[in-house]
Each structure stands twice: as structure tokens, then as C-alpha cells.
Image (spheres, rainbow, N blue to C red):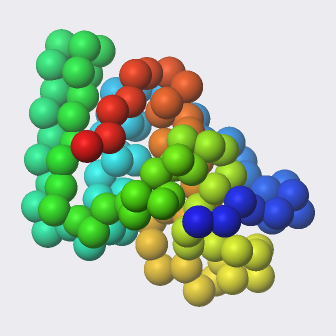
Amino acid sequence: MLKLGIDTIRTVCSGQVITSPFSVVKELTENSIDAGATIIDVRIDDFGLTRLEVRDNGSGISKDDRCFVALPHYTSKLKKFDAISSVETYGYRGEALSAISTVSKVTMV
């Protein structure tokens, strides 16, 4: 993973906003799809306020990249803004996990 350059950050970022447990499920499900998952299991307790768990059989994040996943502006899908037209995934800005981790306790397995 690489940290996005400041020019790319300014151009691309509109700010990832987590407004509800639904938006967390949406973002994590999109991450699962981007990782090639064919099975996605979502478990919710107390309307997502107590626990919200998303498990999948996707390729996941490499051990070397795990330390970057909750940092803002880190992504494996975009290096420069010029490449934005060639992105073929749901997520590319590297903001979802950072935003989720600011409003919740996140555990990666």
C-alpha cells in the first residue's frame, strides 16, 4: 500500500462519512466484493450498535499492509488522480476503514 499524495488527496477526497450502522455494512460489503469474495456473512446485534460483523472469503489484506488499513488516505487501488478512470472497484480512496475506526472498536481477523 502507498499513501496518496497531497494533490491526489485534495482532488479525490470528499470525506468518507459513516452516518449509521448501515453505512458501515455498505462500506465493508464493498470491500469484500473488491477482495473477490463470493460469500459475505453479515451479523448484527442490537441494530449494529453493539456488534456489527462482516466476514467473507475474499483475498483479504496482506499482513504487511494491515498496519496501514485504518490510516486516512492509504489505498492499494489508486496512486495518482490520473488513474481514477481506470479504477474498477467500489472503493479506491482508502477512507472507509479509517472512518469506521474513528467511531467504533474495530477488530480484524
Whether residue 80 is visible to the viewer of this picture, yes or no, is yes
- Percent x, y of residue 24: 38, 36
Whether residue 96 is visible to the viewer of this picture, yes or no, is no
* Along the line of sight, the residue nearer the viewer: 46 or 77: 77
| Corner quadrant of residue 31 | bottom left
In the drawing, does residue 90 fall left or right of residue 16?
A: left
Q: Which of the image's four quarters has the N terminus? A: bottom right
- Percent x, y of residue 11: 82, 61
In the drawing, does residue 104 fall left or right of residue 37?
A: right
Q: Which of the image's four quarters has the C terminus? A: top left
In the drawing, does residue 72 fall left or right of residue 89?
A: right
| Number of marks | 0
Q: Please report the residue visible at 56 percent of the width from the left and 72 percent of the height from the top.
A: 77
| Corner quadrant of residue 25 | top left
**Position of 50 relative to 42 (above/below):** above
Q: Residue furthest right?
A: 7
- Percent x, y of residue 63: 40, 58
- Percent x, y of residue 5: 82, 63
* Along the line of sight, the residue nearer the viewer: 65 or 85: 65
Q: Residue furthest bottom?
A: 86
* Along the line of sight, the residue nearer the viewer: 89 or 75: 75
Q: Please report the residue visible at 31 percent of the width from the left and 62 percent of the height from the top.
A: 60
* Along the line of sight, the residue nearer the viewer: 87 or 1: 1
| Corner quadrant of residue 58 | bottom left
In the drawing, does residue 80 fall left or right of residue 77?
A: right
